[in-house]
Amino acid sequence: MLEVAGVSVRFGGVTALDDVSLAVGPAEVVGVIGPNGAGKTTLFDVISGVRRPSAGTVTVRGEDVTGRSATWRARHGLRRTFQRHQVFSALTVRENLLVALEGGPLRGGVVVDVLGLAGRRRHAAEHERRVDGLLAGVGLEPVAEVPAGSLPIGVARMVELARALAAEPRLLLLDEPTSGLGETETEAFSAAFRDHLARHECGVVLVEHDVGFVMDHCDRVVVLDLGRVIAAGTPAEVRADPEVQRAYLG
């Protein structure tokens, strides 16, 4: 699903990422951990197309997308959540999800316009059915018509996840998804993205400070420190690595 090869990012004389490589397969969850300033968010920016790397390539589903925009990548199956939750505050929860679908493969465009009103109605009905399923799947039905900006952080995080899943992404980037969540909310969040993973063979890259969550939910873990990869492997291998213990887990 994803291959990052030899990616470096430099800001003047500062190296934010130094020859970073990782790969994610279908239905695989790869965690990225490291101390503050390790380069985790910069890596996400490169993968999602927000930032061009100084060197290296990003390949998604076999296609080099290094020069592609964030919009192009989103329309071709990549979705991202952010460290600070970002919902459309004035829109209801349902409307947040419908907006996401308008940018995905089921959007109407010229075809729907040519088909006329009946086509637009079928298009809208299909989106409503998809949204109803998502709302039920992540437990958001009770707040479906509530403005998203009025929700507590845990519920807003679920709205973000549901919005990211709306267009059935094949690659999902989750940036600090459990930040601000309680134990019950974290379990619900985990169940929702794991269900999508199983049904759509979606690859997931997970940046998370909660090391326990990473070790419990990831197939492999990559550890960054000062912009470079210092360890990569299974959760057990990474936890036992002496350099990781020194730089982060100690």
Image: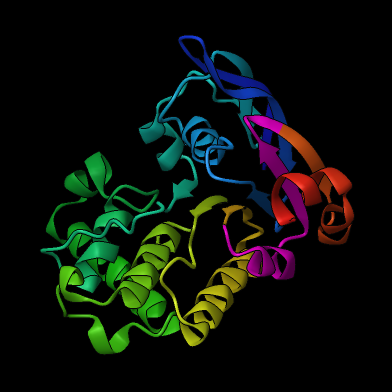
On screen, residue 61 above or below 6: below
Left or right for 234, reference 89: right
| Position of residue 185 in the picture relative to residue 118 (left or right) | right
* Magenta-tinted stretch: 209-228
Magenta span contains residue 90: no
Which is more toward the observer, 121 or 63? 63
Q: Residue at x 20, y 70 (%)?
A: 148
Q: Is residue 130 among the parts visible in the rendering?
A: no
Estimate the x, y position of residue 118 in percent, counting from the top left.
17, 62
Across the whole image, how many numbered discs are drawn on residues?
0
Q: Is residue 224 magenta?
A: yes
Percent position of residue 227, x then y:
62, 29
Can residue 233 be seen by looking at this rendering? Answer: yes
Query: Is 197 rendered above or below residue 84?
Result: below
* Quadrant assignment for the C terminus: bottom right
Which of the image's four quarters has the N terminus? top right
- In the image as oriented, which residue stretches furthest toward the top? 12
Task: In the rendered view, tell whether residue 209 sits above or below residue 35.
Answer: below
Q: Which residue is rendered at x = 83% and y = 43% of the image?
A: 243
Location of residue 10 in the rendering, given as x and y in whole percent from the top left corner: 52, 15
Q: Quadrant of residue 58?
A: top right
Visual colour scheme: rainbow
Q: Residue at x 10, y 63 (%)?
A: 90
Q: Position of residue 182 (x, y in %)?
A: 46, 81
Q: Is residue 250 above or below residue 247?
A: below
Which residue corresponds to the image point at 16% horizontal and 74% vertical from the top-left? 150
| Residue in front for this viewpoint, 98 or 51 | 51
